[in-house]
Image (cartoon, rainbow, N blue to C red):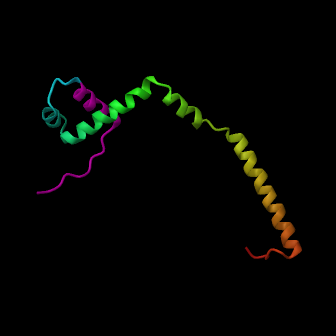
Amino acid sequence: MSRRPRRNHTGAFKAKVALAALKGERTLLELAQQFDVHANQITQWKSQLLEGAAGVFGGEAKAGSAEAVVDLKSLHAKIGQLTLENDFLEGALTKAGLLSARR
């Protein structure tokens, strides 16, 4: 008996199957045969849909996207400042003999 290669389903397909399961018009076995996936997988996708549905209407999604906004200009400025300080301190310590010349 040969095994089927691992399949990666798209989010749209998972949502379609989970919504069909939520409708309740067909049994899990009928849906599993129709979409060619295991019944346990349908149950898992249905649970994930129910858990994530509150985030669509709640403020959780907005809070997560607000944290993702980062000011790249200030971060690049900070990187430049730290690089300059490191180079200065490396030169000063090398002249003082406290840092070996080889790196």
- Compared to 71, does 100 lie above or below? below
Whether residue 37 is visible here, answered yes or no, is no
Residue 4: x and y, percent? 19, 51
Q: Which residue range is magenta in the image?
A: 1-22
Query: Could you tell me which residue is drawn at 64 percent across and 38 percent down?
Result: 70
Q: Quadrant of residue 98?
A: bottom right
Residue 99: x and y, percent? 80, 74
Name the residue at the right extreme.
Answer: 96
Name the side, left or right, on which 34 lies relative to 74.
left
Name the residue at the left extreme.
Answer: 1
Residue 40: x and y, percent? 21, 41
Query: Could you tell me which residue is drawn at 19 percent across and 42 percent down?
Result: 38
Query: Could you tell me which residue is drawn at 23 percent across and 37 percent down?
Result: 42
Name the side, left or right, on which 53 lies relative to 95.
left
Residue 102: x and y, percent? 75, 76
Would residue 16 be counted in the magenta stretch? yes
Would residue 77 be counted in the magenta stretch? no
Q: Quadrant of residue 16?
A: top left
The N terminus: image quadrant:
bottom left
Number of numbered callouts drawn: 0
- In depth, the one of 4 and 59 nearer the eye is 59
Whether residue 4 is visible here, answered yes or no, is yes
The C terminus: image quadrant:
bottom right
